[in-house]
Image: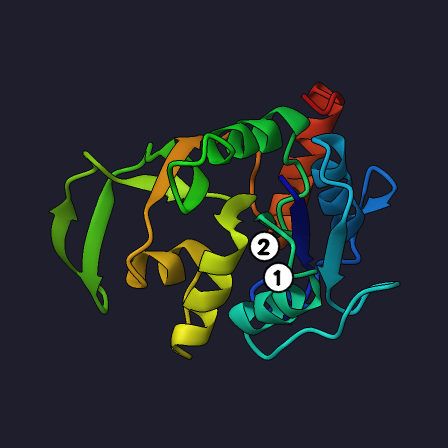
């Protein structure tokens, strides 16, 4: 199997207050940590999309950046791992868990997910409308693995936006399953998240 990867390192970082991909964590920029996570699991051919050294120029939306990365990969790619640079604590074991499930060959996509711990409310402005039942709900992370041809076709099928690539594959009728994610694999969205990531690294500096 030819497995390759894409690290998405674009975005304006509006909620963070500026671009995040070049921020350093433990002396290593976030996008580099994303590449290293994929490399550590044996994915050596990784394309980075974003304003970083050697990276491809990103698109207006995340899905546009992923599509740019897909176009840069060889046609003989069987599976592709999509990872956000904003998740710098992805471990080798997490990447391997996603990849191992994908390579069983019976699905079109695999996403890592964790159970929801908080009570979820539906709101309308400031009004709380209802409480959402958590049973059957999970929070999804990256890296996510997809059959290369299926993901390319899903991107080409429609231009509507999506918060992750699994949504596009789902809407195209693809079969996506989940494996256990990692609570440490947080997304750097706000400045405080970077401090939390540093604390996690200090308490457990390993990559497993």
Secondary structure under tag 1 reads loop
Q: Residue at x 67, y 21 (%)?
A: 208
Report the quarter where the N terminus lies: top right
**C-alpha distance separating marks 1 and 2:** 4 Å
Residue 123 bears which disc, if any?
none
Return the residue nearer the eye: 77 or 164: 77
Place of residue 139 in the rendered image (x, y in percent of width and height, measured from the top left):
38, 42
Between 105 and 22, the residue placed more toward the observer is: 105
Would residue 164 be seen by someone viewing this image from the given angle? no
- 1 and 2 marks in contact (CB < 8 Å): yes
- At which x and y percent is residue 144? 51, 45
The residue tagged 1 is 16
Q: Residues within 10 Å of mark 1 (few under 14, many from 20)?
A: some
Q: Which residue, given by chain and number where applicable, does mark 2 sit on? A: 190
Mark 2 or mark 1, which is nearer the start of the sequence? Answer: 1
Position of residue 58 measured from the top left corner of the image (x, y, whole percent): 68, 73
Characterize the local packing of mark 2: few (<14), some (14-19) or many (20 or more) Cα atoms within 10 angstroms. some
User: Is 42 displayed left or right of 117 in the figure?
Assistant: right
Image quadrant assignment for residue 113: top left
> Residue 185 occupies which quadrant of the picture?
top right
- Tell whether 185 sits left or right of 124: right
């Amino acid at each position: 199997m030819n497995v390759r990867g894409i690290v998405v390192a674009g975005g304006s970082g509006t909620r963070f207050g500026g671009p995040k991909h070049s921020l350093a964590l433990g002396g290593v920029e976030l996008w580099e940590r994303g590449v290293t996570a994929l490399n550590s699991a044996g994915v050596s051919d990784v394309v980075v999309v974003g304003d970083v050294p050697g990276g491809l120029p990103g698109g207006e939306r995340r899905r546009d950046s992923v599509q740019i990365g897909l176009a840069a990969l060889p046609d003989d790619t069987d599976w592709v791992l999509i990872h956000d640079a904003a998740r710098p604590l992805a471990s080798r074991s997490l990447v391997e868990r996603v990849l191992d499930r994908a390579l069983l060959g019976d699905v079109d996509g695999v996403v890592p997910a964790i159970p929801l711990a908080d009570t979820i409310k539906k709101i309308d402005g400031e009004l709380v409308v209802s409480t959402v039942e958590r049973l059957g709900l999970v929070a999804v992370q990256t890296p996510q693995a997809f059959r290369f041809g299926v993901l390319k076709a899903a991107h080409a099928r429609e231009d509507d936006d999506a918060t992750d690539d699994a949504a596009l594959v789902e809407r195209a009728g693809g079969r996506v399953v989940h494996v256990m994610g990692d609570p440490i694999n947080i997304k750097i969205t706000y400045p405080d998240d970077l401090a939390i990531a540093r604390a996690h690294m200090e308490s457990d500096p390993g990559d497993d």
